[in-house]
Image (tube, rainbow, N blue to C red):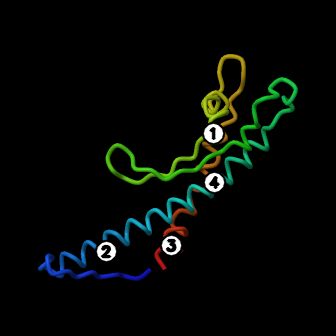
């Protein structure tokens, strides 16, 4: 990770320009780390969904399997903080809460909870790797 300092004539305070460069570099590092964390969560979610996959291909011909329709995105939330979102795609996204939490006639699988638990201890290692 390197620092880039830009100085223009309209910016008279070099320290202010330096601080702005640090904030830009920090945001880039945060995006990189969140992207990597999102990909790790996606990997665990797909593994957990494959573990619970059932043979329902005849019943839902037009819909892909949930493990095949997982999307990762990095966005700003309402408060302006960056967050990685791992969610279902257009065709299966509306079913995630039912499969994860269950309902009256089905047992919950908790595939998202298990994925987040398995990633819990690895976040610090990802930060160290990105900050080098």
What residue is shown with label 3? 130
In the image, is 51 to the left or to the right of 3?
right
Residue beneath the point at 60% across and 43% down: 113
Mark 2 or 3, nearer chain start: 2
Mark 2 or 4, nearer chain start: 2
Residue beneath the point at 57% across and 46% down: 86
What residue is shown with label 1? 89
The relative height of residue 16 versus residue 123 in the rendered view (above or below) is below
Q: What secondary structure is marked by label 2?
A: helix
- For the residues marked 4 and 3, what is the alpha-carbon distance in whole angstroms? 20 Å
Q: Position of residue 34 (x, y in %)?
A: 50, 59
What residue is shown with label 2? 22
- For the residues marked 4 and 1, what is the alpha-carbon distance in whole angstroms? 22 Å
- For the residues marked 2 and 4, what is the alpha-carbon distance in whole angstroms? 32 Å
Query: Quarter of the image containing the N terminus?
Result: bottom left
Q: Position of residue 120 (x, y in %)?
A: 56, 56
């Amino acid at each position: 990770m390197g620092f880039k300092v830009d100085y223009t004539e309209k910016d008279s305070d070099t320290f202010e320009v330096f601080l702005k460069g640090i904030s830009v570099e920090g945001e880039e590092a945060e995006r990189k780390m969140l992207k990597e964390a999102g990909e790790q969560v996606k990997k665990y979610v797909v593994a957990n969904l494959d573990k619970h996959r059932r043979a329902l291909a005849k019943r839902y011909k037009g819909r892909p399997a949930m493990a095949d329709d997982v999307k990762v995105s990095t966005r700003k939330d309402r408060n302006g903080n960056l967050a990685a979102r791992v969610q279902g795609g257009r065709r299966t996204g509306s079913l995630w809460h039912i499969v994860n939490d269950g309902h009256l006639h089905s047992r919950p699988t908790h595939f998202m909870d298990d994925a987040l638990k398995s990633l819990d201890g690895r976040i610090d290692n990802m930060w160290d790797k990105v900050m080098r």
